[in-house]
Image (cartoon, rainbow, N blue to C red):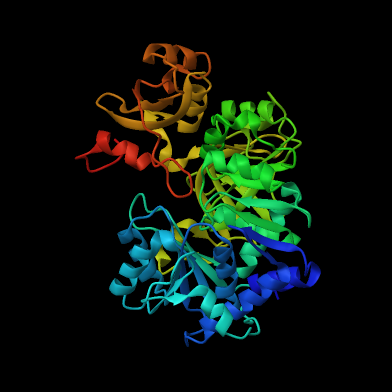
Amino acid sequence: MISLPAMIERAARLNPDGVATRYAGRQYSWTEVGDRTARLAGALRSFGFDVGDRIALLSLNSDRYYESTFAVCWAGYCVVPLNTRWALPENAYAVKDSESRAVVFDDAFADQAQQLVADVEALEIAIYAGEGDCPEWALSYEALITSNDPVVASRRGDDDMAGIFYTGGTTGFPKGVMQSHRAIWASAVGALPDFSMNRDSVYLHVAPMFHMADFAGSMGVTLCCATNVMLQSFEPGEVLRTLGEEKISHSLMVPAMIKMVLNHPDLSAADVSNLKILMYGASPMPAATLEYCMSIWPNVGLVQAYGQTEMAPVLTTLSVADHQAGGEKLKSAGRPTAVVELRIVDEQGQDLPRGESGEIAAKGANAMIGYWKKPEETAKAMTGDWVFTGDAGYFDDNGYLFIVDRVKDMVVTGGENVFTTEVENAVISHDAIMDVAVIGIPHAEWGEAVHAIVVLHEGQSVTEEELVIHCRERIAGYKLPKGVTFRDQPLPLSGAGKVLKTELRKPYWEGRDRQVN
């Protein structure tokens, strides 16, 4: 049987004395992690919940977050990772919607957890997994492990639901993606060849562990019986120090994180001699940032992973070998993993020939069960076994997938479709630009106008006219920004590191019934 608990049991059997986790001065072997997970599962089972009930996690990265993820499934329940960037009302929605019976929380979310327990009727138990004194209204994570005997792992697995992963929330209510044990396992198996992990690998969790991108890293490490090192949250200087001190061989970062690391003053002093693979994904990587990373760290292998929560999450990978400076493949998202089949379809769901852009549809063992309690949304997103991703892209003659944009982020100006990612790549290739987001804003004549919101490198300057001239050499005239906003603050990001374009659009579309014309 394929299951998350079976992955921990396998690692403890194959590499019993190997280091499984390191965090904040603590270190546990795979045997110890297996025992702690089984004991925590015993504590969870003692609460008398029904098989398949949900337990929420609201915490920054830690070894206890990792253990909790597997312990919930070990006990026979389903894990609900909550977004650490969400406000109380958003997480309250997810807890109520999932009907979670318990929440595991840390110091950063003690106030939120206490309020959730008070406000959500179904939420009966709070488990404190922080580093200080346990609040009187909660149960101690470590005390539960100490005071409970290990239990045999649940027989739930294969196509049974392992967890609900909430996605979206910037427009309308978040959707809970139901993922099975098999889907989570299959996604990791499909990605492993390009991730190139083995038993000696040391993986740094720096992306938020609630997010499916880092979740895939967790599963890969577990399958390889390798070592997890956790940083509580992302801070570029701390990341650079940890790469050397912990002899990190693998990590996954979203492009926004990589930008900040590459712009940090400690970059030149960082020891990356052990870093073999840096994975990136979850949002578009500007070509200029990618080229700079390759020039600064020429001995570090780069691997792109493209996917989405609905596919647990990996769909395609762009291998180390494909990362050649100046190569056309750098613009692509790579090719489907061994467990994934992809199609490019038109608005009627019909296949399009290679080279033509359309919506990306996917199927495989890693496809979601559906959206929790949202049958209509599930029906919109799935046709049979096919998941319609909402992303637009095309295949080249060698089977490489090129992502052009989110279908919903496309700007329609004067009847022409403009994919914002293409414009963003042109803008950020200017030396003065540190970050950019391109959106559509209202225009009386064209319906929408292409608008760029940019953040400059410190000490750099460029005028709107100079930027447009720069872009004119790279993209067609109708794709050029018709206006530029210079922003002093970083672009707003979701917990997954994606730019919140909905927030950027608000001032321009305020008072209008539609977000497009």
Does residue 426 appear anywhere in the picture?
yes
- Residue at the far left in the pictured view: 511
Q: Residue at x 39, y 61 (%)?
A: 109
Q: Quadrant of the N terminus?
A: bottom right
Q: Is residue 474 left or right of residue 270?
A: left
Q: Is residue 444 left or right of residue 237?
A: left
208 or 380, which is in the foreground? Answer: 208
Q: Quadrant of the C terminus?
A: top left
Q: Residue at x 66, y 70 (%)?
A: 33
Above or below: residue 404 compared with residue 338: above
Q: Is residue 503 left or right of residue 476?
A: left
Query: In the image, residue 443 lies at what x, y percent?
Result: 27, 27
334 or 456, which is in the foreground? Answer: 456
Instruction: Please state the total of marks drawn on the protein image.
Output: 0
Q: Is residue 321 left or right of residue 418?
A: right
142 or 362, which is in the foreground? Answer: 142
Q: Quadrant of residue 318?
A: top right
Q: Quadrant of residue 322?
A: top right
